[in-house]
Image (cartoon, rainbow, N blue to C red):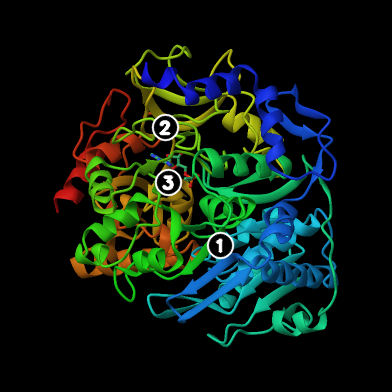
């Protein structure tokens, strides 16, 4: 087997047979105030504690550490094609900004272990806000700026932040998107209230002010001039952040991550997967509200001593060459994006790709959703650099399948994110026998415990849910379920074949169909609803809803149906955000269910995608599925 002979195979074998030895070596990649006494405490599985006894700090390793060697080199490059701003912060300047933000936090009474919720657009202050938490041991919880008040409220309720950091507005495609009214509404909806709301005023919108609670960033910043805030040394096993993600229930899960393991894992990944060297520039087009933004806009590149680009804007404005012009201007060496963005760019004028000097670029990394072969081929041929598909989850924090080009440039295969990353003991497990599947046999992609450093510690405030959700899928084996179907070929390359649960992936954004259903159900005229993810050529998947209406007389004409459909979409926009808005809302009088009342979501999805609906022996009333077909035909 090609994947079994060289550097990669050796490193991989070692990482799974002697994880403690392997990760003890990688620990030297970061600086410790006190080195760890024990590499792994696995005495209470599935809760693994990495680098026990070690004291370190993410902000120290991402910022302060580099002051000795590269204080005047670029660290953070903020580019907004919306407000036409472009600011480069050197490591020294980034340090100064982060210290000031940390001083503001302290002035507002934020202490180690307190939660700080960050609801911000892609501006430099958002990165100061995250790094300042890391500096003083406060736990950040970044909420994607595209989420609206109900999504935000459930996260405030769960994380109980003492401080929320926000801004008056963001901008998208030339339009101002106000943040403060949504935030105020979320705080109103939540039973937990933050002590303070720290507002960055960009001068884009007139944000309402709640006296005593809301404080102004610029005013406080001038009041802390000259205040030094040294790094707080944290236990490696302390919590660095919470990041909410969708699952099978409507209640989002707070993925909780540590300090030391995350710092080591990310630094290792920058070297072994992303081939990043200190002094180079990394451009990840994600958003700080997602895990890719945490790991590969903020922490990963900075830990590696690289400059990182924070970009506010779309890939198409002022024209579809904007990303490539950034690559040329800042000599970007590594770029990270999602297949959807590439599919969008593929529809544009190909001359825009040829217009810029892209010779600095070493590779393009794509993740978040399946990379289809035509898209992969097109971008690979257009850029002439390796395209590195990598597969992972919010829960793992860094890639678990990829070709680790920093170890060995194994060939890639279109349609496959590659082979297991060092540290991840991955098996494809049969759902029925719980045995490992043979090559080319479909099963559930699972990770044998213990999870490597950098992965989730638990679900915030709910250890039991962590065990029940992730570690209870297979009898007799201690394995973490990814809830993705997968397959491994004879050469060890893996293929991802869709989710086993009700999570959908719209343009690389992970959403729970249950959350969307709950939102739609809050409309006064909706009795019941089913939401499924349906294949889409551009976005990968889109949400499609089938709703039973209480007052059927209100939706007799096509115009009435269209009006109600628009109204329901608006409910989702207002509660969850436009990112969760279904592409269509169809009206039915019956939903396909089993005789015990379980929604047959898979069958609905299959029908929507023109596939066979599968085993229907348990269906209560076959007429329900016919109604779905009729909706789609009509
Ligand atoms: O279904 C898989 C899909 O995205 C899910 C994780 O989404 P999220 O938690 O938002 O983390 C994204 C981190 C990149 C996975 O369970 N997914 C992610 N990467 C890939 C993928 N599906 C196919 N190929 C990938 N490369």
The percent coordinates of residue 51 (x first, y second) are 76, 34
**First in residue order: circle 3 vs circle 1:** 1
Disc 3 within 8 angstroms of ligand 1 (CB) = yes
The percent coordinates of residue 381 (x first, y second) are 23, 48
Q: Residue at x 39, y 54 (%)?
A: 361
- How crowded is the residue under tag 3: few (<14 C-alpha within 10 Å), some, or many (20+)? many
Residue 335, quarter of the rendered image? bottom left
Q: Circle 1 sits in a helix, a strand or a loop, which is it?
A: helix
Of residues 158 and 297, the one nearer the viewer is 297
Q: Quadrant of ligand 1?
A: top left
Report the disc number at residue 368.
3
Are the two marked residues, 1 and 2, in contact with CB atoms closer than 8 angstroms? no
**First in residue order: circle 2 vs circle 3:** 3
Report the disc number at residue 115.
none
Of residues 6 and 51, the one nearer the viewer is 6
Q: Is residue 287 above or below residue 53?
A: below
The image shows a total of numbered marks equal to: 3
Q: As drawn, is 285 to the left or to the right of 19? A: left
Q: Circle 2 sits in a helix, a strand or a loop, which is it?
A: loop
Residue sitting at the far left: 633
Instruction: Kindly tell me whether residue 116 is visible in this rendering.
Output: no
The alpha-carbon separation of the residues under discs 2 and 3 comes to 16 Å
Q: As drawn, is 316 to the left or to the right of 257? A: left
Question: Badge 1 is on which residue?
Answer: 150
- How crowded is the residue under tag 1: few (<14 C-alpha within 10 Å), some, or many (20+)? many
Q: Circle 3 sits in a helix, a strand or a loop, which is it?
A: loop
Question: Badge 2 is on which residue?
Answer: 500
Of residues 178 and 125, the one nearer the viewer is 125
Q: Is residue 167 above or below residue 145?
A: below
């Amino acid at each position: 087997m090609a994947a079994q002979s060289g550097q990669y195979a050796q490193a991989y074998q070692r990482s799974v047979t002697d994880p403690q030895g392997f990760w003890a070596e990688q620990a030297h990649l970061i600086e410790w105030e006190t080195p760890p006494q024990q590499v792994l405490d696995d005495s209470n599985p599935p809760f693994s504690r990495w680098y026990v006894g070690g004291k370190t700090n993410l902000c120290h390793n991402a910022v302060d550490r580099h002051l000795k060697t590269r204080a005047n080199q670029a660290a953070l490059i903020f580019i907004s094609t919306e407000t036409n701003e472009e600011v480069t912060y050197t490591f020294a300047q980034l340090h100064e900004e982060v210290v000031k933000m940390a001083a503001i936090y302290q002035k507002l009474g934020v202490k180690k272990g307190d939660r700080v919720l960050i609801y911000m657009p892609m501006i430099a202050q958002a990165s100061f806000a995250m790094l300042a938490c890391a500096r003083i041991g406060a736990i950040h919880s970044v909420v994607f700026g595209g989420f609206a008040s109900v999504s935000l409220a459930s996260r405030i309720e769960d994380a109980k932040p003492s401080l929320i950091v926000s801004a008056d507005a963001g901008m998208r495609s030339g339009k101002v998107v106000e943040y403060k009214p949504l935030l105020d509404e979320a705080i109103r909806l939540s039973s937990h209230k933050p002590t303070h709301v720290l507002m960055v005023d960009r001068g884009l919108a007139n944000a309402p002010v709640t006296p005593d609670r809301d404080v102004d960033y610029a005013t406080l910043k001038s009041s802390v001039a000259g205040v030094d805030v040294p790094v707080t040394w944290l236990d490696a096993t302390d919590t660095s952040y919470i990041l909410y993600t969708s699952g099978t229930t409507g209640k989002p899960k707070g993925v909780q991550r540590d300090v030391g393991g995350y710092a080591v894992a990310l630094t290792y990944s920058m070297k072994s997967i992303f081939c990043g060297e200190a002094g180079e520039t990394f451009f990840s087009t994600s958003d700080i509200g997602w895990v890719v933004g945490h790991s590969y806009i903020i922490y990963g590149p900075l830990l590696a001593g690289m400059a990182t680009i924070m970009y506010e804007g779309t890939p198409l404005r002022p024209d579809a060459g904007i990303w490539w012009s950034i690559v040329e201007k800042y000599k970007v060496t590594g770029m990270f994006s999602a297949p959807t963005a590439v599919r969008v760019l593929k529809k544009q004028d190909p001359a825009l790709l040829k217009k810029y000097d892209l010779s600095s670029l070493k590779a393009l990394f794509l993740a978040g959703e399946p990379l289809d072969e035509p898209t992969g081929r097109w971008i690979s041929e257009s850029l002439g650099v390796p395209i590195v598909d990598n597969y992972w989850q919010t829960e793992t924090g860094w890639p678990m399948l990829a070709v680790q080009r920093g170890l060995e440039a194994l060939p890639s295969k279109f349609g496959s994110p590659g082979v297991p990353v060092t540290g991840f003991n991955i098996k494809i497990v049969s759902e029925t026998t719980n045995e490992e599947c043979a090559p080319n046999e479909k099963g559930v992609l699972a990770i044998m415990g213990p999870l490597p450093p950098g992965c989730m510690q638990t679900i915030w405030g709910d250890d039991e849910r962590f065990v029940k959700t992730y570690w209870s899928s297979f009898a007799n084996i201690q394995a973490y379920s990814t809830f993705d179907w997968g397959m491994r070929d004879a050469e060890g390359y893996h293929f991802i074949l869709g989710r086993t649960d009700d999570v959908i992936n719209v343009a690389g954004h992970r959403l729970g169909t249950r959350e969307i259903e709950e939102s739609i159900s809050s409309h006064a005229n909706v009795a019941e609803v089913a939401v499924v993810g349906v294949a889409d050529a551009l976005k990968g998947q889109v949400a499609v809803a089938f709703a039973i209406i209480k007052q059927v007389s209100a939706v007799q004409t096509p115009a009435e149906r269209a009006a109600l459909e628009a109204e329901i979409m608006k409910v989702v926009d207002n509660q969850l955000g436009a990112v969760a808005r279904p592409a269509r809302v169809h009206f039915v009088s019956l939903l396909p269910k089993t005789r015990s009342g379980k929604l047959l979501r898979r069958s609905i999805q299959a029908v929507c995608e023109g596939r066979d609906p599968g085993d229907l022996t348990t269906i209560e009333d076959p007429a329900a599925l016919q109604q779905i077909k009729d909706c789609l035909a009509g």
